[in-house]
Amino acid sequence: MNQPDGRQLTMPSTGVTRVRRAVQADVPELVRLRSLLFATRDEAYFNSAPDNGGAPVRDDWRRNLASVLEVQLTADAARILVVDGAHGLAACGIGTVEQWFPGPHSVTGRVGHVIGVVTDPAYRRRGHSRAIMRTLLDWFRTQGTSRVDLYASDQGEPLYRDLGFVDHPDPALYWRPAHH
């Protein structure tokens, strides 16, 4: 059943997880769920703010995220999926596809990325993340991706391995430019 704003209601009595594409009205809840993803991470990478002359910028990323989500909701190279809860969203997951340069290991050069599959603590252990991941993997297949990459939390790793993800042959490294 769909609401006038495009949201689909989940009937909890069936036990079936219904995954749908996010709509504009979901943006505040998507920001809330993404915040949960970082709230439990202690690493400096996830909790450091760029130098802004000493001014706190901790909420800037939320505003920036909302702006990017609004644009990406209908982008061809992104798929933002959600599961409705009784009051707000129960879970979300984002997939993107980038065009890289083809090679023998990546014939199409199209690489998928899973970004931040998050389930609200009140809705965990109900299969929502698995349903979102299966829907994303189906979408990646239709996009002609050669592979799909993700970074797994300790809690999420067993699910991803169960879905067929394996260790990447290359080490994951990153670089952050200095912010002035």
Image: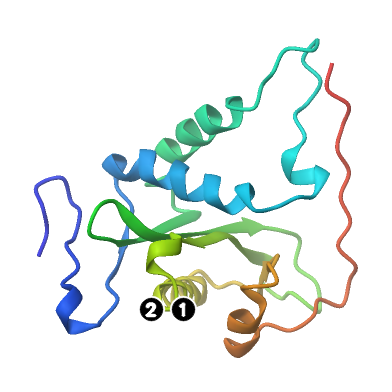
Q: Position of residue 58 (x, y in %)?
A: 64, 27
Q: Is residue 37 above or below residue 153?
A: above
**Image point 72% across, 59% down: which residue?**
100
Residue closest to the eye, 165 or 88: 88
Residue 139 found in image quarter: bottom left
Residue 126 marker: 2
Q: Is residue 96 above or below residue 54?
A: below
**Image point 46% across, 42% down: which residue?**
31
> Of tags 2 and 1, which is closer to the observer?
2
**Image point 74% across, 74% down: which residue?**
106
Alpha carbons under labels 2 and 1: distance apart: 9 Å
Q: Position of residue 77 (x, y in %)?
A: 50, 54
Q: Position of residue 68 (x, y in %)?
A: 50, 36
Please tell me whether mark 1 sits on a helix, a strand or a loop. helix
Please tell me whether mark 2 sits on a helix, a strand or a loop. loop
Residue 130 marker: 1
Colour basis = rainbow
Q: Amino acid at mark 2?
A: Arg
Q: Amino acid at mark 1?
A: Arg
Q: How many marks?
A: 2
Residue 6 marker: none
Category of crowding for the residue at label 2, using alpha-carbon neighbours closer than 10 angstroms: few (below 14), some (14–19), many (at least 20): few
Category of crowding for the residue at label 1, using alpha-carbon neighbours closer than 10 angstroms: few (below 14), some (14–19), many (at least 20): some
